[in-house]
Image (cartoon, helix red, strand yellow):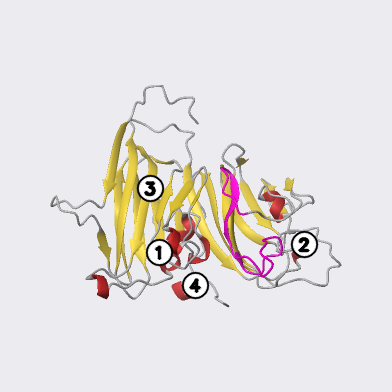
Amino acid sequence: MFENLSQYKNFKAKRISSYDKTGGNSDRWVIDAQSSRTIADIEGPGKISHIWCTIFGKWGEEDKREFDTYSLRKVLIRMYWDDEKEPSVDCPIGDFFGLGHARAYSYQCAFFNTSCNDSIEGTINPRIAMNCWIPMPFRKKARIEVVNEQDINIIIYFYVDYQEHKEISTDTLYFHAQWKREKPVAIKDNGGVNLTDKNNYLILEAFGKGHYIGTNMSIDNTEGNWWGEGDDMIFVDRDNDDKWPPDLHGTGSEDYLCHAWGMQKVSHLYSGQPWCEYNEYGNTHHNKGKVCVYRYHVIDPIPFKKSIRVSIEHGHANDRGDDISSVAYWYQDEPHTVFVKMIPAEKRIPEERR
């Protein structure tokens, strides 16, 4: 990480931010209800190196302020590279930064960190600082759009730090991130045997040349008991050949997430469980509530030349029907396959049972 820090950097550092251009202290932009706003439109070649932001609801006198508790799911962040019309990044803003279930919690890893006041830790609240350090190169143009799918205006404070380069090398790929949500059907009649990924939860399917760099997952344990026995399976460059076994086959969800004997509440560089609801016994192994986990392939990316399919069982042999959402992160060449249309805001809200 630091080995090249002493070498001269042959680029120009630049920033776009929400600062008050009058010289005052109103360092925020307003995004009206049910509308969008481009927060960065950058000419290339260049590379986005850091994004910081925080959002809040209707702004006014202290006793008249409002906010939608589910802003982290109802507000979207989208990114477009060069001249593309369809986004390469399409995620609820909280999930993009690793905040699942619209919860606020502080954590730190190689790609992201977030920070909130202790008083709102673990609550449904958008008042949190969100940071991303994933490199995002582009050749012609980069555009970042924030979409407010709420019925109230929001304010956003932001930095987009980037680098101006003379050129981007021909082997440089483009960053992508896609959110999805599914409540898969539990399969109880397979005798506990699964020799296909057909019914798995699909984290990513991409076509082209690139490499997968990880995922965060938000799991709502609706079935009770231990959720983490589902194996991860990754097929690479198969050309519709699903011959068993996959190129990478795991031994359980907790194992793919670099844990063992259940999940622990930790935030490491490349894997972690930064937030979870504890059950009545005060442990997380048989957690009956919601969990947020991540696994990032920073030093062990998984390359593909033609295609990749990343999936994970929902329970052993898909015997569970929990509510799962995820963000997949990867680099690839363009054009990419157009993403499935984002589901409506109301259907992105987590189910609350307590």
Mark with earlier residue (3, 4): 3
Mark sitting earlier along the chain (1/3): 3
> Which residue corresponds to mark 4?
349
Crowd tier of the residue under label 1, counting other residues whose Cα lies within 10 Å: few below 14, some 14–19, many 20 or above: many
Local secondary structure at mark 2: helix
Image location (x, y in percent) of residue 330? 54, 47
The magenta segment: 265-290
The residue drawn where x is 31% and y is 59% is 156
Where does label 1 land, which residue? Answer: 126
Give the Cα separation between the discs numbered 1 and 4. Answer: 13 Å
| Mark 2 lies on residue | 316
- Residue 207 position, x and y percent, is 58, 50
Q: Secondary structure at mark 1?
A: loop
The type of residue carrying mark 1 is: Pro
Q: Label 4: how many residues lie within 10 Å, few (<14), some (14-19) or many (20+)?
A: some
Q: CA distance from mark 3 to mark 4?
A: 24 Å
Name the front one of labels 1 and 3. Answer: 1
- Mark 3–mark 2 Cα distance, whole angstroms, equals 38 Å
Q: Label 3: which residue?
A: 51
What distance separates the C-alpha of mark 2 from that of mark 4?
Answer: 27 Å
Which amino acid does the dot numbered 2 rest on? His
Quick check: is 288 in the magenta stretch?
yes
Q: CA distance from mark 1 to mark 2?
A: 34 Å
Residue displayed at 72% across by 50% down: 260
Dot placed on the residue nearer the N-terminal end, 3 or 2: 3
Mark number, residue 254: none
- Helix, strand or loop status at disc 4: loop
Q: Is residue 241 among what the camera can see?
A: yes
Q: Amino acid at mark 4?
A: Ile
What main secondary structure does the magenta stretch of the protein show?
loop
Toward the left, the furthest residue is 22
